[in-house]
Amino acid sequence: MPELQDVLDRAAAGGRISPAEALELYVHAPLQALGEAANAARLRRFGDNVATYIIDRNINYTNVCVTACKFCAFYRAPKHEEGWSRSLEDILRRCEETVTLGGTQIMFQGGHNPDFGIEFYETLFSTVKAAYPSLTLHSLGGSEVVHISRVSGISFAEVITRLKAAGLDSFAGAGAEILVARPRTAIAPLKESGETWLEVMETAHGLGMESTATFMMGTGETNAERIEHLRMIRDVQDRTGGFRSFIPWTYQPENNHLKGRTQATSLEYLRLVALARLFFDNVKHLQGSWLTTGKDVGQLTLHMGADDLGSVMLEENVVSSAGAKHRSNRMELIHMIRTADRIPAQRDTLYNHLLVHRDPAEDPVTPEVRSHVSSTALTLTPA
């Protein structure tokens, strides 16, 4: 298909493609040609064969939530007998474990608890930062800012400014799911609109707070709506440059109100990863995930334009509660990257390389990490 190849060549060379062209590529381009173009775009951007990972911990501070998203198996309604909130003492213990195991990042995520306003988060972040200044707090997301704004009666800008002053370093892409109105309303009718989520992120970028952007695919959206989700993110990125990376993953169907099987196949996911590398000429990093798709598919993303495989996470509860059963550890993740013919490198939140594993014989595994691997399954999840 010569016309599609022309579009692939332009995108691989760094040229911009339109949403209509992106949809044609996503639906019709041969998989091999799509992957080759995406990989060429990655090589042009980075000029090396490195693939990164990060060691971090996702600490869920509460499962109490008033938003009741249909895809979520983690939340419990206020006053539910299974609702809980972690003590600050428990959170600090988990942070200490993270530092001991070589972790550099904490991602705080939780439900929209009606009892938690801005003061709760200020205390949380400032206490953790004071005790463990080496940890980067890459946490919350647009939805949490909207919730805090409602509970505390303050603007998005004030919420963000106060969170930043308390120690929050950057926002995760939490709450994006799918930004397009029809499917978003179908799966999360009580959540803010996609436009509002993007407004929060744009406000944060303007206040010096970078973020990631995510996409949960497979909840019934059309191919055109998948591309529209990307378009909405790219338009904001044109104005702010504040999205550090893009992280697509697939919906997990267990223990929630959507039920049914995951509607995004592995092939659809891989095509979306490659298409994202070509479409996002203005977003530097692209993360492949295998918590929801499996290790083989996660490894294949490194041949479809991804430059990062996310985190060796020391704790994760939200996606796992919906049925994600894949587990790994740091040693296996390094092996996955190597056998994809890439050079593994541990990174920090800003994607700076902390340790490049050029020689397999010198892969560092501390006694603490080895002990933890033997007793606890480490997982990879969107960050």
Image (cartoon, rainbow, N blue to C red):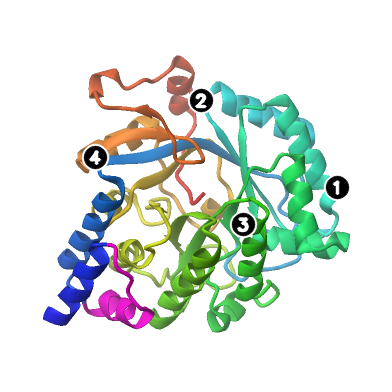
- In the image, what residue type sits under mark 2? Gly
In the drawing, what numbered circle is on residue 102?
A: 2
Left-right relation of 328 to 107: left
Would residue 71 be visible to someone looking at this image? yes
Residue drawn 41% across and 42% down? Answer: 327
Residue 85, image x, y percentages:
77, 46
Q: Secondary structure at mark 4?
A: loop
Instruction: Please tell me whether residue 17 belongs to the stretch shown in magenta.
Output: yes
Label 1 belongs to which residue?
Answer: 119
Tell me if residue 169 comes above or below residue 95 in the rendering.
below
Q: Secondary structure at mark 3?
A: helix
- In the image, what residue type sits under mark 4? Arg
Residue drawn 40% across and 52% down? Answer: 287
* Mark 4 surroundings: few (<14), some (14-19) or many (≥20) residues within 10 A: many
Left-right relation of 92 to 70: right
* Mark 3 surroundings: few (<14), some (14-19) or many (≥20) residues within 10 A: many
C-alpha gap between disc 3 and disc 2: 29 Å
Label 4 belongs to which residue?
Answer: 342
Residue 315, image x, y percentages:
56, 39
Determine whether label 1 and label 2 are within 8 Å by CB: no
Residue drawn 24% across and 40% down? Answer: 342
Label 3 belongs to which residue?
Answer: 205
Quadrant in which residue 374 is drawn = top left
Residue 99, image x, y percentages:
58, 25
Left-right relation of 91 to 49: right
Question: Which comes sooner in the sequence, label 3 or label 2?
Answer: 2
